[in-house]
Image (tube, rainbow, N blue to C red):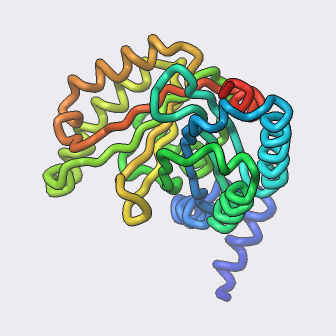
Amino acid sequence: MSADKEQANNTRGALRLAPTHSEVEEQKAKLPRQFVNFTFYKTRPEWRLLANEDKQRCRQEFVSVVDEFRKSLLIHSYSTVGLRTNVDFMIWRIGYELEPIQEMTSRLNKTEMAKYIEPSQSFLSMTKRSMYIDKDNPDHVEDRLHIIPGKSQYLFVYPFVKTREWYSKPAELRQEMMDEHIRIGSKYRSVKLHTTYSFGLDDQEFVVAFETDYPADFLDLVQELRETKASSYTLRDTPMFTCRQRSLSECLDSLG
């Protein structure tokens, strides 16, 4: 090591100088990314024919298995009863490895409850730094790579796919269109967005989840985004799921 470089390192250590741009980028690159899974379940009609004591035993076993994985995964549950006809509840799982997600699913498949429910939709994705710059908050690395679900009452989830034409546009033009998109989103402070990426992992390209206590704000946000230029390059953004955050026991109790 040269004397100048050694002196610079010593000075930085002594004075705690701010990291250089290259050091910040290197640190960002080392941040671990998360796997994200949304699994929606539908109840079979046979469930309603069970005796109440059998239902209670099934629910307790199912909840117990899920609780075993809370040390390795962030797990949140949501009820969709009465909000869609093809799903009854959803489990949102977030972790740094795929293995716990698979192991948890395998364990749940062996429970008694598994005889009476079936997954109707499942979306797999990962966190990733966006290639588009949020000019209001350009350094929100943690928000992009680490999802920390809040306590909002509602979660709106949907997968979406952009057209191939979108990716053929120059990066500068896409950034310009996304500036409009981001600017509109920033108006709705009550809505928290989680964008995750599925390229090559699942059938969609993105899975987005919006947290809020005010469904009307989310509705207005989506309606306004429909009028943006970027929206015309959306190939598919369905199905959409409206979910209400409940404990897993409450979700299962609501099945009848």
The residue lying toward the viewer, choosing from 209 and 103, is 103
- Specify the quadrant that holds the N terminus: bottom right
Q: How many marks?
A: 0
The x and y percentages for residue 125 are 49, 55
- Specify the quadrant that holds the C terminus: top right
Residue at the image position 72 percent from the left and 75 percent from the top: 7
Residue at the image position 73 percent from the left and 34 percent from the top: 50
Residue at the image position 23 percent from the left and 34 percent from the top: 231
**Vertically, is 42 above or below 7?**
above
The residue lying toward the viewer, choosing from 224 and 240, is 240
In the image, taking residue 243 as reference, residue 131 lies left or right, namely: left
The x and y percentages for residue 87 are 51, 34
The residue lying toward the viewer, choosing from 193 and 170, is 193
Residue extending furthest bottom?
1
Residue at the image position 80 percent from the left and 50 percent from the top: 70
The x and y percentages for residue 44 are 57, 39
In the image, taking residue 8 as reference, residue 119 lies left or right, namely: left
The residue lying toward the viewer, choosing from 130 and 77, is 77
The x and y percentages for residue 82 are 53, 20
